[in-house]
Amino acid sequence: MAKEGISRIDLGEKDPRTAYHWLTRTVAPRPIAWVSTKSPRGKLNLAPFSYFNAGGANPPSLVFSCTYTREGKPKDTLRNVRETGEFVVNVVTREVVEAANLTSRAFEYEVSEFEEVGLTPAWDTAHVTVPRVAESPIAFECRVFAIVDHGNGPLSAHYVIGEVLAVHCDASLLDEEGMPDPAKIEHCARLGKSFYLRVREEELFELPRP
């Protein structure tokens, strides 16, 4: 039964900023991809994106949307993945969420967020020439499969689809079968406004599939 008092907002008739607030405050919680890239000249970049999720498992893939800035310009991450074809997605947990937030600042192109925020590049990646973030407990080495542009101008979407080539995981987060244990990871997710959500073990519940 439909609830009374439901309002309809035609987002296609709203300005991009208003649409942004409607989406980010209602499509939540959203996992955060902390994406490390490298410019063609070798300068490291690191930025968080909450338009992010898994794509498929055959082959394993991830997708994140790197929107244009409010000024309608491509972000450094998008420039780098277009030119190099590779990136690493680092998982954001409660332990590193403050650092991830600091890397969202609009630094000048080829200014390294690793250096500015004081993070450690881990150069043990096997399939890409981009480092993972040593402080993050889980990281995915990815090769760009495709970039799908949807729209143009401020806040337009640019979906980066990456094929996952390898995953790095802190051994303390594995269960007795050697698989990641969701109760141990303490993911952080993005909500609307300036809110975040911490996933705690006591908040988890299970539902068997029908």
Image (tube, rainbow, N blue to C red):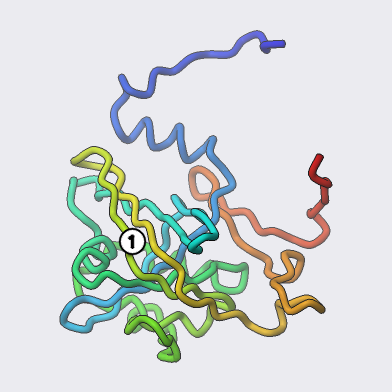
Please name the residue that numbered disc 1 is placed on.
145
Name the spot of residue 140 as percent of width and height, x first.
48, 73
Q: Nearer the viewer, residue 31 or 169?
A: 169
To which quarter of the image does residue 185 belong? bottom right
Q: Nearer the viewer, residue 98 or 13?
A: 13
Q: Which residue is the extreme one toward the front?
A: 58
**Position of the C terminus by quadrant:** top right
Instruction: Name the residue at 34% across, 50% down.
Output: 159
In the image, is 43 to the left or to the right of 202? left
Q: Amino acid at mark 1?
A: Phe
Instruction: Name the residue at 23% across, 42% down.
Output: 154
Vertical placement of residue 117 versus 201, above or below: below
Vertical placement of residue 28 versus 126, above or below: above
**Position of the N terminus by quadrant:** top right
In the image, is 171 to the left or to the right of 50? right
Q: Nearer the viewer, residue 1 or 119?
A: 1
Name the spot of residue 133 as percent of width and height, x first.
46, 80
Instruction: Name the residue at 60% across, 60% down.
Output: 188
Q: Which residue is the extreme one toward the top?
A: 4
Name the spot of residue 147 as percent of width and height, x first.
28, 54
Vertical placement of residue 179 versus 129, above or below: above
In the image, is 161 to the left or to the right of 90? left
Vertical placement of residue 9 versus 77, above or below: above
Name the spot of residue 182 as percent of width and height, x first.
72, 64
To which quarter of the image does residue 95 belong? bottom right
